[in-house]
Structures are given as C-alpha cells and as structure tokens.
Amino acid sequence: MADAKDWTGELGANWAGLIEAMDRQLAPAAVPGLSALAAQPGERVIDLGCGGGPTSLEIARTVGTEGAVLGLDISPDLLAVARTRADGVAQLDFAEADAAQHRFAEPPYDALYSRFGCMFFDDPPAAMAHLRRALHSEGRAVLTVWAEPRHNLWAMLPANAATEVLGEAEKPAPGAPGPFGWATEEIFMPILETAGWRDIAFSAHDLEMEIGVGEGTAEARAVELCCRIGPMARRLQEAPEAEAELRRVLAPKLTPHVRDGAVRLPGRLRVITALA
C-alpha cells in the first residue's frame, strides 16, 4: 500500500501525469464530502491532501473572494498542476508541506476538509490534534475515507488479478498508512477522540467511478490505468516482466462492468464529520 513518502516521488508524478483521468474517476467521491462541508461565503478552509486542486478550486468558488482556502499536499508534481489551475484565484493558496507539522497562519480556520488525504500519517492522533488546533473552537472537520476494500471493486479487481498472477501480496497492518488506513470506525474513531475532536459522526456512501485512460476499448483503457496507478501498478513495480499476463487476466474481469462506453466500478466511502 502507498504511504506518505510515496507521494513525494514517483506516485505523485504518475498521478500528475494522469490528472484528467484521475479527476474524472474521483469526481463522484467529492460530492458527499463537499455537501457535508457546506462551505459558506467568507469562510477559511484547509484542504488536506489537495492533490491537483479540484476540490480546493470548488471550495474557493464557494467561499468567494472574502474567504480563503489553503490546499496542503506533499507532492510537488501535483501542486504544480494545482497552482496552474488556480492561477488568478486570489482566495486560493497552496503549500507543499507535511500537514502534521505545518505552521498555520492566523486567524484560525473555520473548517478542515479532506478527500482521501488523512489516511497517510505516521502518527495520526498527533497529526489530527495539530490540525484541530488550526481551527477555531467551533471549527468543523469533514474527512472522506475509503471503506473496507471488499466494498471497493475499483481496487479489488486489479488486486485480485495481481494475486492470480503473482501470488498473495503482503497485507498491511490494520490502520497502517495507506488508502484503506481509516477503513473502519474501530480505527478512525479512537484516532479522532485521542486528538480531541468531538461530536464525531460518519455516514457511508456508495458510488460508481469511470476507470480508464488512453485509447482503445473500454477494457483496454481501464487496464492501462490499472497498470500505471493503484494496487496492480504497485505489484508491477516488483515484477515488471508479468505485465502482459496481468493485462490478459484483468481485461475479462472488467467486461461485465462496461457501460456507456467505459468501465465503471463501484466503491464505498465514509464521510466523517467532527467539531474542534
């Protein structure tokens, strides 16, 4: 599984190179979190793990020129994309920084938002306590996290194909940094409680995502993306000689999920809300 340091190098660079496909894939995942955030004109908001900036831009449009948005990420490649996209948006700024240690400017922020950016900390309670202190006493957090892998076919199909070809991968410990690091309430509730957050609640949301990049059939485009980013791509780094076989095994698994000219795979996320 990816951890934080991967985003500073090849993983962040790969994601930046695939930014349009990844934004298209993850656009449905932003909807429930931004709805829960319900940013208001004039508010100051932190966007944790902002990546190429699509959610930062959306929040900036909502808070308007009287508000302010700070997008935080550790990937220089993704932030380069974000800054280009945000050119001329005065209320939006970005920082290449570890959010667990970043020195936030005064005055305190109104809200902390994250779309899949909170699951990569080495010391999650300390990081979330630090972020809580960046908000005023009635500030709020809205954190979107992936639910268990079994509910996320976009990850499980390529992971299962890799298992067929390469054998079982080493399983991360529960709560280890990675995309599914906050997959259950048994993991994230104690983290947030220890960090001092209160009135913690969460809700589950099912979604469907378009998977693919490049040319060819829907299956070919989806296979191409899975070979370049995600669980199968990570296995390919260990065994690049298996790429042709992995492509052969994965393609027919995707065919039942082709609709309207694209592979569309289901996922489940949780939206966590809390008060500082």
Image: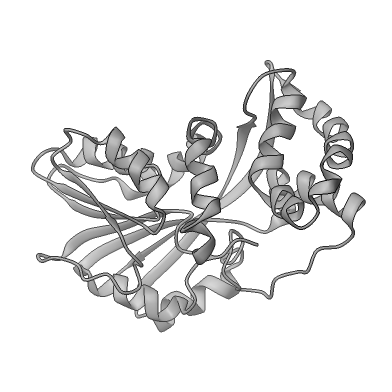
Q: Position of residue 112 (x, y in %)?
A: 30, 59
| Residue at (54% x, 44% y) in the render | 14
Residue 92 picture quarter: top left
**Can you say whether 188 is above or below 68 in the image?**
below
* Observer-nearest of 131 and 198: 131
**Can you say whether 165 is above or below 106 in the image?**
above
* Observer-nearest of 189 and 48: 48
One can see residue 98 in this view: yes
| Residue at (65% x, 41% y) in the render | 228
Q: Position of residue 125 (x, y in %)?
A: 43, 79
| Residue at (62% x, 35% y) in the render | 208
Q: Is residue 40 left or right of residue 179?
A: left
Give the position of the N terminus as an image quadrant: bottom right
Q: How many marks?
A: 0
Residue 213 picture quarter: top right
Residue 105 picture quarter: bottom left
Q: Is residue 70 left or right of residue 204?
A: left
* Observer-nearest of 41 and 214: 214
Q: Position of residue 46 (x, y in %)?
A: 27, 56
**Can you say whether 184 is above or below 196 in the image?**
above
Q: Is residue 200 left or right of residue 140?
A: right
Q: Is residue 16 left or right of residue 97?
A: right
Q: Position of residue 12 (x, y in %)?
A: 49, 50
| Residue at (86% x, 62% y) in the render | 168
Give the position of the C terminus as an image quadrant: bottom left
